[in-house]
Image (cartoon, grey):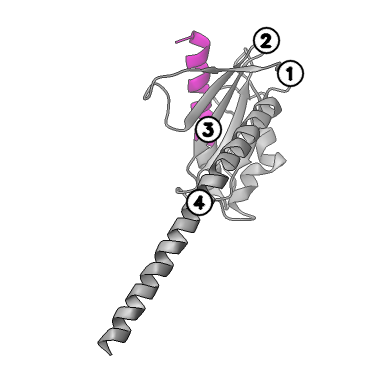
């Protein structure tokens, strides 16, 4: 009886070790592909929010200089404005929304784009990616007048609105050339 228990423990341990090794190997193969796909999605988002841009350069900032929602700031090399990448914690704070916001040199939003909102409730929180919500931001300045949270999706849309407000702080930072 004791031998059977020991044998079972050894078999289960070996199965766990083999499974862990396989998962590690798969991760080492897929991680670069996932990183490349994410970088491509971010680059595509930059051109969506600043469609007249020719190319982008990243604006460097020290940790703590910008709101935590701001993940990157890019300047259009032709001087057309700035694109800000944001990570907003909506309904599922462990899987934040990824948002791109374009702001022209007059401080007006050119466009907002949702890169990812997979952590939001389907059909409710995902309404932040619908044109009816996103279009309300176009031509808005930092006051975001006329932009309201979505009824029934208050957590997601409020987090989105707060992130867009943080984009203006990043815009000011980049424009001042700090």
Q: How many marks?
A: 4
Q: Nearer the viewer, mark 2 or mark 4?
A: 4
Residue interval drawn in magenta: 161-178
Determine whether label 1 and label 2 are within 8 Å by CB.
yes
Which is the main secondary structure of the residues drawn in magenta? helix
Is residue 54 among what the camera can see?
yes
Work out whether 174 lies above or below 15.
above
Q: Residues within 10 Å of mark 2 (few under 14, many from 20)?
A: few
Along the horizontal axis of the image, is 15 left or right of 161?
Answer: left
Tell me the element at label 2.
Answer: loop
**Label number found at residue 25:** 4
Question: Between disc 2 and disc 3, whose residue precedes?
Answer: 2
Say if the magenta span includes residue 162: yes
Mark in the foreground, 1 or 4: 4
Residue beneath label 2, please? Answer: 78
At a point 34% along the width and 73% down the height, the residue shown is 10
How many neighbours does mark 4 have within 10 angstroms: few (below 14), some (14-19), or many (20 or more)? few
Q: Are marks 3 and 1 in contact (CB under 8 Å)?
A: no
Q: Which mark is residue 86?
A: 3
Residue 138 visible in the current orientation: no
Point out the frontmost of discs 2 and 3.
2
Q: Which SS class for mark 3?
A: strand
Residue at far bottom of view: 1
In the image, taking residue 135 as reference, residue 125 lies left or right, namely: left
Quadrant occupied by the C terminus: top left
Front in this rendered view, residue 157 or 37:
37
């Amino acid at each position: 009886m004791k031998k059977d228990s020991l044998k079972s423990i050894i078999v289960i341990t070996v199965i766990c070790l083999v499974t862990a090794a396989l998962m590690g190997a798969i991760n080492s193969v897929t991680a670069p592909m996932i990183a490349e796909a994410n970088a491509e999605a971010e680059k595509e988002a930059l051109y969506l929010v600043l469609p007249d841009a020719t190319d982008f350069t990243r604006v460097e900032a020290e940790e703590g200089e910008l709101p935590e929602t701001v993940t990157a700031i890019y300047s259009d090399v032709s001087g057309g404005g700035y694109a800000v990448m944001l990570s907003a914690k909506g309904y599922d704070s462990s899987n934040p929304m990824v948002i791109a916001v374009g702001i022209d040199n007059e401080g007006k939003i050119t466009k907002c784009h949702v890169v990812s909102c997979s952590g939001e409730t389907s059909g409710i929180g995902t309404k932040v990616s619908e044109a009816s919500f996103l279009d309300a931001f176009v031509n808005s300045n930092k006051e975001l007048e006329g932009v309201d949270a979505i009824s029934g999706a208050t957590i997601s849309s409020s987090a989105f609105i707060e992130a867009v407000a943080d984009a203006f702080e990043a815009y000011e930072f980049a424009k001042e050339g700090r």
